[in-house]
Amino acid sequence: MKLKKEDNVIVISGNFKGRTGKILKVFPKKNRIIIEGVNLRKRHTKPNQQNPQGGITEKEAPINASNVMILDPKSNEATRIGKKIIIDEKTSKKRSVRVSRKSGEMLA
């Protein structure tokens, strides 16, 4: 899976098409991700120590990772991800970084 936590993504298909948000959690084995403010579900909770009032809470549910694309940091549009090997100047070791296919800019 090429997506990581804290990446900014846009939903490209499904009920939430066009929405953008930050990835909160990644489930690589299930190929699902949780995005901030997308796919909200209501849950009825009993009163407890943390929430003495109880009531209905909203929580993000996971969606399939194939339904999202990462946002290009330069143009803020959907883009694919590539890999590039760069040589670190300090240690002179090779390391792999993720690169935006549209602008060629490195992703965090």
Image: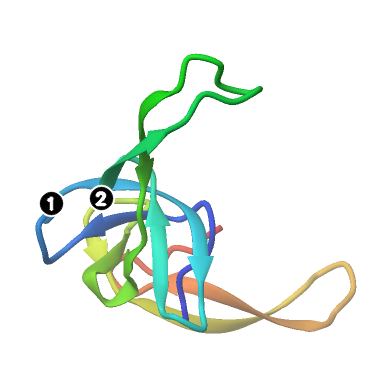
Of 82 and 50, which appears nearest the observer? 50
Where is residue 34, by image quadrant? bottom left
Residue 49 placement: quadrant: top right
What residue is drawn where x is 11% and y is 64%?
Answer: 14
- Circle on res. 85: none
Callout 2 crowding tier (Cα within 10 Å): few <14, some 14–19, many ≥20: some
Identified at 54% across, 82% down, the residue is 84
The quadrant of the image that shows the C terminus is bottom right
Per the image, label 1 sits on a secondary structure element best described as loop
Image spot of residue 95 (x, y percent): 71, 81
Q: Is residue 39 above or below residue 93?
A: above
Q: Residue furthest right?
A: 91
Kind of residue sitting beneath label 1: Gly
The residue positioned farthest toward the top in the image shown: 53
Q: Note whether 44 is above or below 21 in the view shown.
A: above
Where is residue 26? Give x, y as percent.
51, 66
* Amino acid type for the residue under numbered disc 2: Asn
Task: Give the residue at x 42% y 81%.
Answer: 82
Q: CA distance from mark 2 to mark 1?
A: 12 Å
Q: How many marks?
A: 2
Residue at 45% across / 22% down in the picture?
54
Residue underneath mark 1: 18
Q: Is residue 56 above or below residue 80?
A: above
- Give percent across and percent down for residue 31: 41, 79
Q: Which residue is mark 2?
A: 39
